[in-house]
Image (spheres, rainbow, N blue to C red):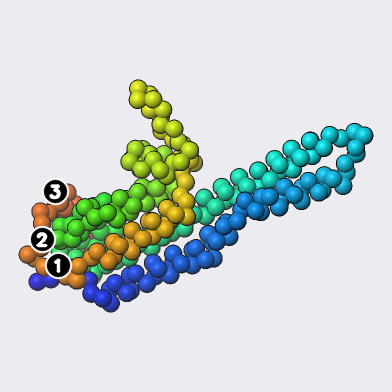
Amino acid sequence: MNIFNFDKFDLRVLLGPHKFYVLQAKQRLLSQFNDISREADEVEKQHYEKLGQFFDPDRDDPADSYEAAYQEGISHYIALDEMRNTVTLALTAGMFHQFDKALREKMVMEFRRWQPAAVDPLIWNIDFPELVELLEWTGIDIKSKTFYEKIEACQLLVNVYKHGKGRSHTELAGKYPQYYPNYTPGTVRRKTLPRPEQLKVSEAQFTDIADAIRDFWLNIPEFRNESHLRDQPEWFDKEMKRFDRYLKKNAVKKP
């Protein structure tokens, strides 16, 4: 009996929306921030010209006008850079949400063929690392692949983006500090954590994560059968029994 099927149609259905999302995110949104340095220079120039309209050579120092215009340009650049990061983080979170939802839907479809009904709510309630453990149980290698680190980091940074401080923040800072580019970890004796608001994703990192998600789907074999099964995750039996009890307790009684 096949326990996990993934044919060319599945790949097209799952990979198509992902590719569309990434392409449109870059063309429609991220491209708006391609030239913020030039925009900042233009703001500086315009501000200097505006100050020049009220310049009094007997009273004003030209250096003050240069400095004020320069600071205006810097402020504009910083504001746009912060907005770019906010947009990139939001797009990254949306991309991972699309991927996570599609993966759970596919896993429910496949697991319900050979597991009790309780597997449906289980798959929708467990965390992403447990999803990966279930896939590896069916004989699909995930964690050993080069794309996995990018996906793991994405799952953590999305949690930080949504919730701030917590386990994901600590884990992300420890394992993937590149997403906190302005973070200095401190000394060996007294290490510090970055602030959640220091989280940053560049367009290049967004692309790397998008490519990792693409590679994840391309890595799924066409089918897995009972001969491919590995050791069942230790937590699975316990969780299945818990959800089974929940379903029986909340089942609608026939009149």
- Report the residue at 81% width, 49% height from top: 49
* Vertical side of 220 occupied by 90: above or below: above
Q: State the SS at label 2.
A: loop
Q: How many marks overall?
A: 3
The residue pinned by badge 1 equals 224
- Specify which label sits upstream in the sequence, 2 or 3: 2
Q: Which residue is nearer to you in this view: 53 or 236?
A: 53
Q: Which mark is residue 229?
A: 2
Q: Given the image, on which type of amino acid does mark 2 rest?
A: Leu
- Specify which label sits upstream in the sequence, 3 or 1: 1
Q: Which mark is residue 234?
A: 3
In the displayed structure, does residue 39 sit left or right of residue 200?
Answer: right
CA–CA distance in space, label 3 to label 1: 21 Å
CA–CA distance in space, label 1 to label 2: 8 Å
Q: State the SS at label 1.
A: strand
Residue 166: image location, x then y, percent: 38, 39
Residue 84: image location, x then y, percent: 55, 52
Q: State the SS at label 3.
A: helix
Q: Quadrant of residue 189?
A: top left
